[in-house]
Every structure is written in structure tokens, then in C-alpha cells.
Amino acid sequence: MRATVHPPIRPRRFRLAALVIAAVVSATSLVGGSPAAAASATITVYAGGGSDDVGSVFANILGANHRYTFNGYDTWDPAAGQVRPDVVAKTRQMGMRVLRWPGGTVGNTVWWKGTIGTDRMCQRDGRITDLGEVGNPADDVMPARYPAYGLDEHLAFVTAVGAEAQIMVPMAISNAIDAADLVEYLNTPAGDGVNPNDGPDWAEVRAANGHPAPYGVRFFELGNENYHTNQRYWMAQNQTGVNPPARAAITQYVNGGSRRLTGERLGKLTLRDAAGNRSCTGSTAGVASDGTPGQVFNFRYPSAAVDTFALRVDGVTWRRVENLASAGPADRVFLLRPHIGEVQFGDGTHGAIPPAGADVVADYTSEHRGFVHFYRRMKAVDPTIDVCAAWDRANFPALFAELAPAGSRYDCLAAHPYTHFTGGGKADWDSALEAHDWHMMSAWDERESVAQLRQAVNANTSAPHPYIAISEYGALWGPEVGNPFPEYAYSMTHVLYMASQWIHWLELGIPWAEGNDFVSHAWYTLLGPAGGGFLRSAEAVAREAVTPMFAARGKRIRHIVAGNPLRDPPDAVMCDGGAPASCTGAYEKLNVTATRAPDGTVYLMVVNRSPVEGDAITADVVLHGLVGSGTATVRRVAPSHFTSHNDVATPSAVTLSEWQRPVAANGFAETFPPYSVTLVRLPAAAQS
């Protein structure tokens, strides 16, 4: 049996002795039958300050990952030039504090300078398609995406909702000068006409684009999940060496490197129709020349070392020139834009046109700087920003300390503590109930992974230590075939998982965290499409319920939960799919945290994760150090079932209720329904 660690951090999963199991089964084995007998617990809250204050409360825990594609998943209205008003209203309602752009995998190959102004460039979609050899980036294909929801649109959105932006800086095709220019565009005042990188004054470009004042973005991360082989791009694919991931790839991420690509058939991100209109309907998949003037082809991995670039049209080598204006109509020449991955041919007057049907093939070396160089260039523009590394594996801090030049550092390490059911061997769901239990049992695992990552960072850095941030998290990849709970990703089960993580991130002192995803066309976590508009998911409603506690900030305070009932799912059910040893675990039904705002208001957040109908838990809440006003406000999300969810057919299946209740001087008793999220606000006496 795993003993409970004393507050402020308490494990939620146990190995149970036979006697404890017998006590729990009676309250948990009646799902689908008669309601379970009511359980009881005692929650003691210490609000007196001093040693009972155990950490700070960060409002930015309630953030989300947002992707630039499909007009920001239809949140941006290109015709009106604004975020859709109902999106703004619903985003404010859920207390959104920080929004990531341009997203994760999809944003790994975005060139930010092509997402601003009026002359925008088709972007590579980072979700590659491998056409052949896994270790050969030359055959990876990236579809084209038009960036209507670009950098300025994202900043307009976060400004409209009172949040702030967090920017993922793609390292797969970007370079350090672009990254430094990005910081200048976002954060430096216009008017001085100076670019520290000897290029255009990007603050002046921002002003010309309609935003004279600096945006003041604080949070940046370099790359997204480059530890996955399908997000290595030009980096080494070899998985040998330090396991996992490969030492060679970490070395390239930290210090930079290169990759030789040969025989790559060039594609076209931008295609033209018969009338000559351009559209982002292409890809980097190889296409033949169409015989038209001024064709632009794209290679896959900028930046290219100019002196290594060789290009052939139907096997005949053509010559690179600095401009096409001086070329004759028969000259086999091309213009190379190495940093954005473009090759342009002539128009038949200035430079020859590749014959229709001809293949365009290139050999080149893709050269890249590493994290260390990016970090220095970005911080030189604005030393106040936080630049996060994004290789969230436990071996990264030690390898960074070994591989990076002396004096190198990172301000934070961005983690993605996902529960992946399929990859974790936890997706053999025979019922929605089993899926629910796997969600609850898995939440603690991700909390532990973040804690271990922080320990690794602290052990391999000097004070002040970099902090851990979370730029994506959630529970996903359930069964693809025969899923008995297809709505799990936007159900109350998912809400209880995420609410548990909000408490965990609060307890671990995570300064900002972003759930995945803000909006999606299919399964979603916050806003979903509904007849041309957007409806609020169950999680959006739960975020609204607990927003006051996070928005008030203040201090996390000591609390003790005694008699917390346990749920022990049947081993025969949980372990029948070859799941890991954790299939024999159990979890506490209540997940609890408490905070005190600067004005003395105390907040108590309680999540009852039980899936058992009627499994309400009555808790005696004992208050120490609070002279209250005698009245509390209770906000609760408690639908009819753990599978409840908001969709087009039932848009209000999960709602928020709020009411007042009396509170005695020393506390009160409150009953917490199953599958519910509750926030109790206890004002200090002076506020009465």
C-alpha cells in the first residue's frame, strides 16, 4: 500500500491492502445499479498566513493552445477583419489568461514574417507526411496553409479578451535573426529606426501594420516536441545513444547542426488557377513545371547553405544568380531565397522558363543554429522575456549542462504532460466507466512527470533555476475503433481530469499552463462549432466556475483532507487489455486545493471525481485563521452523468450554478455531488 504523503502534495493513487479494498468496494461497485451510500470527509483549511502559506497562485494556469490554421479554426473572421464577437465573449467568460500561437506540430514550420501585413506567404504545415524512408527528410511532404490568422491577428485576439500571448518560435525552418526580429516586432518601441540585426526596423513595420505600441509579449518557447522523430525534420532521426531520445538530436537542438538533402523534387506551396489567381492549395510534394512564366518552387527545409545548393531541371544543371533582371530569355538560371525556401525561375524574357512537365530537383545542406544562439539573439533585443527550451525529457537538463557552452541557460522548460491512452497501453476500454477510471488514474502520473522534470532541472542548473511551464496538456488518443465513449475528450470525465491538473499545476507552482486545444473542427476542449457559431464545452463551463480563484491570485494555503474516500476500479476490468501495472491502482475521489486572495478572501476548490451515481461526499470544512463574513458563494458544475457533454443536440447539458449559503465561525458542512467541480468563495469579515 502506498501511504499518503502529507500536504501540500498528496498522491491520488494507491496500492491497497485487502482490508482497505473491502471498505471501498461497497461504495464503488454499484455503478449502473443503485446509488452508492453517501461518504464523508473532513477538509481542514489553514488561512492564517505565515507557515501556512505554501505557494503563489498564478492566474495563467487557465491558458490554452491555439493554432493558426483554418483562420484560427474559424475564430477569425477575415471578411470583418476581427475575431468573431461570440468567441471573444465566450473566451472572456471562461477566464482565458494566456493563448499560444501558432500552435504545436502544425506551427513547427511557420515563418512568422510571412504571416503579417498584406503580402502573406503560404506556410508549411508541420504535420509532415513521410513518403518513404523514415530517416530521410527529403521525402517528407508538408501541405500549404494560408495564414489569415497571423501574428497580429493573434495579438488582437488576446488583447480583446484581456489575456496575453505565448509564442512558439519554430526552429525547424527559422533562423536566429528571424527570432530576434520577432522580439523586436513584438516588444520594442517604434520611432528610433534601428534594428540591432542590421535589417528593417521591425517596430516600424508593426506600426505600419496598425499597432504602434509594443505588444509586450513575455513568454516564448523554441520549437515544439522535436524529441518526436516525426518532428525532427532536418535533425537526426537515429534513436540510438541516450534513450530516449537520441543524443545526436539533442546536440543539434542545443548547438545547431546541418543535414544534407539530395534528390529532393521541389514542390509548390502556392498554386495558380487558369485565371492566374494564387491559392495555398499546394504542398512541398514534388510537382512538374507547368511551363508558365515566373514559377516559384519550394524546398522543404530552409535555411539552405547557398554554396551547397545545386538545382537540376530534367537532369540539366541550372545556375543560381543574384537577380533575374540581367538574364537573357534562354539563360538557364534561377533566384534562390535560402531563408524562406524558395526558388524562382524567369519569365522567358529575363531567364528561361522550365519546360512544361520538367522535374525540378535540388541538392542542398539545411543549416541551423541551435537553442543557445537563438536564446542569446532574442534576449539581446529584450532581456526581460522568458525563453523556454522545449525538449521536455528528463535527460535534457543534464545533457544541456554538458553540451551547451559555459554560461548558457534557459529561462524555462516547456513541458507537454499528456496522457496518451494508446501509447500508454490504457485504451482497451470496454465501457465509458473504464475510460473514466483510466482518466482519473492517469492524471497523477502526469503530475509526477512534471515534478520529476523540475527535479532534473534543479539538479543541473544553478539558482535562480529555470521554471517548468506547460504549453500543451490533456488526455487523448483513446480507442480509434469500437470506442464505447467517443465523446470522452469533451465530456465531464475530461473536465474532471483537467480540473485535477489545474490543482496539480497550482500545487507545483507552474506559472503558466495551456490546455489542448482552444478550438477544433472535431473533438474539442473549450469551444466547438455549432451551426455557424460556437458552443461552450463542459470544460469551458468548469473554467468559468473556478476562474475567480485563479484571477484573485494570492497564496495557496495549507489544507488537510481526512477520510478521503477511495475508488478502486476492478482489476479484472482495468487489466484485461495488457495495460501497465498501474491498472491495479486506485484514486482518491476528492481532489482539493485552497487559496487566500490578497484581500483575505478564501477559496476552496473541490473536485469529486467519482463516476458512481449518487456518490455524494459530505465534507465538514473546518476553517482556521479566517474571520468570515458569515456567507459563502458556491459555484458548481454538476451534470447528470460523468458522460454528460455539450454538443449541438444538448448545448446545455453541462451548466454552472451559483448560490449563497451561511457559514459558521469555525466552518460548515457541504455535500459534493459525484462528477462535479465546486468552488466555494469565503469572504473575510471586512467584505460583508
Image (cartoon, rainbow, N blue to C red):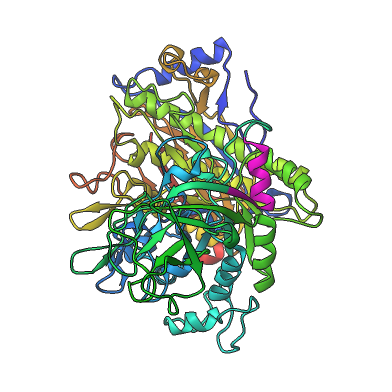
Quadrant of residue 58 in the image?
Answer: bottom right
Q: Residue at x 29, y 38 (%)?
A: 644
Q: Residue at x 23, y 48 (%)?
A: 651
- Residue 435, horizontal then vertical, whole percent: 38, 27
What quarter of the picture does the N terminus occupy? Answer: top right
Q: Is residue 243 above or below residue 513?
A: above
- Residue 187, horizontal then vertical, whole percent: 57, 75
Quadrant of residue 222 in the image?
Answer: bottom right
Quadrant of residue 84 in the image?
Answer: bottom left
Q: Which residues are the magenta region? A: 245-259
Magenta stretch: dominant SS?
helix
Q: Residue at x 65, y 78 (%)?
A: 196
Q: Is residue 293 above or below residue 312?
A: below
- Residue 551, horizontal then vertical, whole percent: 51, 61
Q: In the depicted view, which residue is nearer to us: 66 or 280?
A: 280
Q: Is residue 229 above or below residue 371?
A: above
- Residue 409, horizontal then vertical, whole percent: 73, 56
